[in-house]
Amino acid sequence: MRVSVDQDKCCSAGNCVLLAPEVFDQRDEDGIVVLLDERPAERMHAAVREAADICPAGAILLSEPR
């Protein structure tokens, strides 16, 4: 799995950080998402998918390697 984020879309809800703190963080000054790991371990995939699914701004993009 490869993860990317669109910081311009992020609305600072923070759900991603709650679900997958090893993969996502937030900037202190404005709460915008910061991607910590663009290729998370398989054990994190379910949490990352859930974070992408519930992101109110649709700022988390997932792709699968070929």
Image (spheres, rainbow, N blue to C red):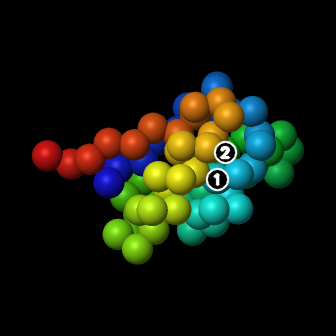
Q: Which residue is mark 2?
A: 33
Q: Are marks 1 and 2 in contact (CB under 8 Å)?
A: yes
Q: Secondary structure at mark 1?
A: helix
Q: Secondary structure at mark 2?
A: strand
Rendered position, 52 above or below 16:
above
Q: Residue at x 64, y 53 (%)?
A: 16
Q: Locate residue 61 relative to residue 51 in the image: left or right.
A: left
Name the image quarter holding the N terminus: bottom left
Rendered position, 22 above or below 36:
below
Q: Residue furthest right?
A: 29
Q: Residue at x 40, y 74 (%)?
A: 43
Q: In this orientation, does residue 17 appear?
A: yes
The image's mark for residue 16 is: 1
What percent of the width, then of the height, locates residue 51?
A: 57, 51
Q: Locate residue 29 relative to residue 40 in the image: left or right.
A: right
Observer-side mark, 1 or 2, equals 1
Q: Residue at x 59, y 63 (%)?
A: 20
What percent of the width, then of the height, locates residue 28?
A: 82, 51
Q: Residue at x 35, y 49 (%)?
A: 2
Kind of residue at badge 1: Cys
Neighbour tally class for label 1: few under 14, some 14-19, many 20 plus, Cα within 10 Å: many
Q: In this orientation, does residue 35 appear?
A: no
When asked about the image quadrant of residue 13, the answer is top right
Kind of residue at badge 2: Val
Neighbour tally class for label 2: few under 14, some 14-19, many 20 plus, Cα within 10 Å: many
Q: Foreground residue, 27 or 59?
A: 59
Rendered position, 9 above or below 33:
above
What percent of the width, then of the height, locates residue 47?
A: 52, 62
Separation of marks 1 and 2 at Cα, in angstroms? 8 Å
What percent of the width, then of the height, locates residue 60?
A: 53, 40
Q: Foreground residue, 22 or 55?
A: 55
Total numbered labels placed on residues in the image? 2
